[in-house]
Amino acid sequence: MVIECWGRVCDQLRSDIGQDAFQNWIEPLNLLSVEHGVASFSAPTSFVGTWVNRNYGDSIALMMTREGVDVDRLDFKADVLVKAEKAPEPEALSEQAMPPKATRPIRTSGSEDLPGAPLDNRFTFDSFVVGKPNELAHAAARRVAEGGPVTFNPLFLYGGVGLGKTHLMHAIAWEIQERNPKAKVLYLSAEQFMYRFVQALRFKDTMSFKELFRSVDVLMVDDVQFIAGKDSTQDEFFHTFNALVDQNKQIIISADRAPGEIDGLEDRIKSRLQWGLVVDLHPTDYELRLGILQSKAEAQLKHYPEVQLAEGVLEFLAHRISNNVRVLEGALTRLFAFASLVGREVTLDVVQESLADVLRASDRKVTIDEIIRKVADHYNLRLTDILSPRRARSVARPRQVAMFLAKTLTSKSLPEIGRRFGGRDHTTVIHAVKKIEELRSIDNQIAEDVELLRRMLEA
Ligand code: ADP
Ligand code: MG
């Protein structure tokens, strides 16, 4: 029964997340048991477990529940850890015994003869703020930057605009050069890669192009989606890539989406890019945005020591401004410039006045699954309770709250919302929305619950 349910969930996942992601993340899992709402899996490494739980945990729990096996939470046991506990591997020990990193020395010019793009010296690991949405990408970047045996090759970082891909790549380059000033690190955008290649073709000098690119220790190509559809460049990229992998040289690639989703990229390249480790930078959450704002505000205060920030300004910005860190940074810079010009304390009024356009442009999207999960947590219910036909008030009321939030915070239709709540009719949803609207004006507890949940979901 449980196994069949998992089989159906797998079929659904395969079509939802695509064959590649499915193969990378879901196929290696083994469902061990489901007990008291906890589905236990074994995973090849704890990394895979954490990743799956973070990216697909809620969806898997909901799917299994819909398929008839009550699951509230997933638990992962790493095969590797179990083995490592018994007999620690020598590498693992020596890694732990490594001395702490020395302070940053003056930069040497190890790679200056390479025709890469300049590295921004603000983009280091020190200035990268880590939070839940980027912790795995950050951990993978750190691991690669530490050198040692090449295990993730290539490292493929992807994510939306302004989430820190370029920052992380530069940080890796700085770190590698710091640890090993002799390492030949070549960082460039895919666009520059193409430009160099076209130049080489034009001047009939592809030999030195090939030699150059194949002589590096670390090759980093940013925004690789750019070469999609550019056939001869792709071809050359593929050969360079293979030559470096064969020599066990590290390759680090970024793109704005997963390899399998880049249209116009040849299949053999897509599959090659997935050989290593593919990690994504998720859209920022409230905590991460606040952390980044705090760190950037500190830096701004060095330039504008006269500026005074009122209490709550950074929190307000973290709530209201979109996922894109570049937009967040831009807003903060404008705010400081404005405050310094007008010589006023930065209050919420000043923020609203000076950033009206940015604030209008940022509206976050909430999903129904997130709403169900948050409401269940808030009322201490299980996901199954929310989806079940039970009509007891203790379950029905929270379910109505969740439906109300789904209607007001998402653009989903009433029938769609009904379907997502255990296959209910759209009239049930209408009834729930009316009920909660009515209760909000007479029942303080409900009003507070709804407000709190709304704020959490929009954070
Ligand atoms: P991407 O390449 O993904 O489009 P960038 O790496 O260029 O994004 O990041 C955009 C801006 O946001 C940069 O100024 C970068 O320093 C900053 N940034 C992004 N993420 C972080 C973070 N986690 N901590 C600090 N700054 C960040
Ligand atoms: Mg970038």
Image: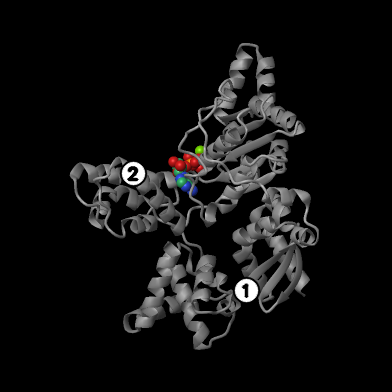
How many marks the image carries: the answer is: 2
Residue 370 in sight from this viewpoint? yes
In the image, residue 439 sits, relative to residue 103, either above or below, namely: below
Question: Which label is found at residue 361?
Answer: none
Mark 1 Cα-neighbour bin, 10 Å: few <14, some 14–19, many ≥20: many
On-image quarter of the C terminus: bottom left
**Residue 417, percent across and down?**
51, 69
**Residue denoted by label 1:** 72
**Residue 355, percent across and down?**
29, 49
Q: Which residue type does callout 2 highlight?
A: Gln
On-image quarter of the N terminus: bottom right
Q: Nearer the viewer, residue 414 or 211?
A: 211
Q: Tell me the residue at 43%/57% (across/down).
A: 364
Sequence-wise, which precedes: disc 1 or disc 2? Answer: 1
Gap in angstroms between the C-alphas marked 1 and 2:
44 Å
**Residue at the bottom extreme, as displayed:** 392
**Residue 286, percent across and down?**
44, 58
Q: Is mark 1 within 8 Å of ligand 1?
A: no
Q: Which residue type does callout 1 highlight?
A: Asp
**Residue 199, percent across and down?**
58, 16
**Residue denoted by label 2:** 300
Q: Nearer the viewer, residue 165 or 395?
A: 165
Mark 2 Cα-neighbour bin, 10 Å: few <14, some 14–19, many ≥20: some
Residue 408 in sight from this viewpoint? no
